[in-house]
Amino acid sequence: MTQARHWQKSTFSDGSDGDTCVELAATPTALHLRESDTPDTELTTTVAPLAHLIRGVKSGHPFHPTA
């Protein structure tokens, strides 16, 4: 039986009640991301790849490994 996920909105969302939010849910083995306007579509990953992507985006080089 699958448990319901506890979705949290990004602090960068505009705060309105509209569908302009990125949401995250954590389970013991994975992170789940979705766009609030398409809640049936999820991206599932783990901490390491997501952290790598975020570091790359912040550095301006999302597709190149960081040192």
Image (cartoon, helix red, strand yellow):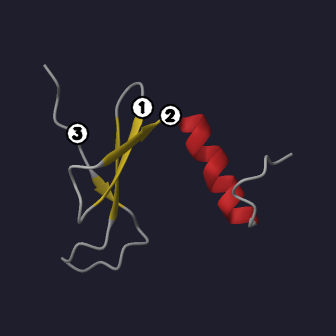
Question: Which residue does the image show at 17% across and 25% down from the upper left?
Answer: 2
The residue carrying pointer 2 sits among few (fewer than 14), some (14 to 19) or many (20 or more) residues within 10 Å by Cα, namely: some
Label 1, label 3: how far apart the Cα atoms are: 11 Å
Residue hosting label 1 = 30
Question: Amino acid under label 3?
Answer: Arg
Q: N-terminal of the two: label 2 or label 1?
A: 1
Q: Quadrant of residue 58?
A: bottom right
Residues marked 2 and 1 touching at CB (< 8 Å): yes
In the rendered image, residue 57, in percent from the top left (x then y), is placed at 66, 62
Question: Which residue does the image show at 22% across and 54% down from the upper left?
Answer: 39
In this orientation, which residue lies closer to the viewer: 64 or 12? 64
Residue hosting label 3 = 5
Taking the image as shown, residue 21 lies to the left or right of residue 55, namely left
Label 2, label 1: how far apart the Cα atoms are: 5 Å
Label 3, label 2: how far apart the Cα atoms are: 15 Å
Residue hosting label 2 = 46
Taking the image as shown, residue 46 lies to the left or right of residue 66, namely left
Q: Quadrant of the N terminus?
A: top left
Question: Amino acid under label 1?
Answer: Ala
Q: Is residue 62 above or below residue 49?
A: below
Residue 59: which disc? Answer: none
Q: Is residue 17 above or below residue 23?
A: below
